[in-house]
Image: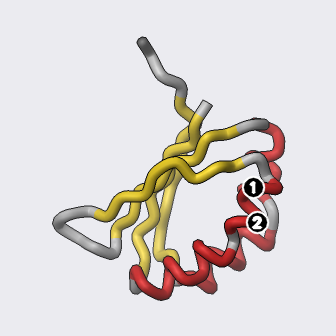
Amino acid sequence: MHMLCRNRVADFDAWWAVFGSHADVHRAAGLQLQRLWRSVDDPNEVFFMFQVDDRRKADDFIAAPESAQAGKDAGVIEGDYHFIIAVD
């Protein structure tokens, strides 16, 4: 399973500094970053995908107040996420 995320941020470089500093927290939540993209039309719109090892841990991570605070610290204006599976 994967989690596909989109964030619109105030400043990509500031967002990236905070996001990158949370790699250990992501791993502890069973999330492994697979890919990161930026929109061609708006470089402050970011898409990223995690491999999800444990859906319950991922849900707990999303719901944690620390995650919301990290988003604020990173300048996230808005975002969404979707749990997805491949259809082959």
- Measured Cα–Cα span from mark 2 to mark 1: 5 Å
Q: Nearer the viewer, residue 16 or 64?
A: 16
Q: In which quarter of the image is the N terminus?
A: top right
Q: How many marks?
A: 2
Residue 23: image quadrant is bottom right
In this orientation, which residue lies closer to the viewer: 54 or 45?
54
Amino acid carrying mark 2 in the image = Asp
Vertical side of 15 occupied by 4: above or below: above
The answer to whether residue 9 is left or right of residue 22 is: left
Label 1: few (<14), some (14–19) or many (≥20) C-alpha neighbours in 10 Å: some
Which numbered dot is residue 4? none
Image coords of residue 18 (percent x, y): 60, 81
Q: Provide the secondary structure element on which disc 1 rests.
A: helix
Q: Which quadrant would residue 25 be assigned to in this image?
A: bottom right
Q: Name the foreground residue: 47 vs 32.
A: 32
Packing grade of label 2 (10 A; few <14, some 14-19, many >=20) is few
The residue most toward the top is 88
Residue denoted by label 2: 24
Q: Position of residue 75 (x, y in %)?
A: 52, 83
Q: In this view, does 19 lie above or below 1?
A: below
Q: Which residue lies furthest to the left in this view?
A: 41
**Residue 3, percent across and down?**
57, 42
* Drawn side of residue 52 relative to residue 8, left or right: right
**What amino acid is at disc 1?**
Arg
| Residue 40 at x, y percent in the picture | 19, 64
Look at 36% across and 58% down and name the residue there. 37
Which label belongs to residue 27?
Answer: 1
Mark 2 touching mark 1, by CB under 8 A? yes
Residue at image location 47% in from the left, 68% down from the top = 78
Residue in the picture at 74% in, 37% down: 53
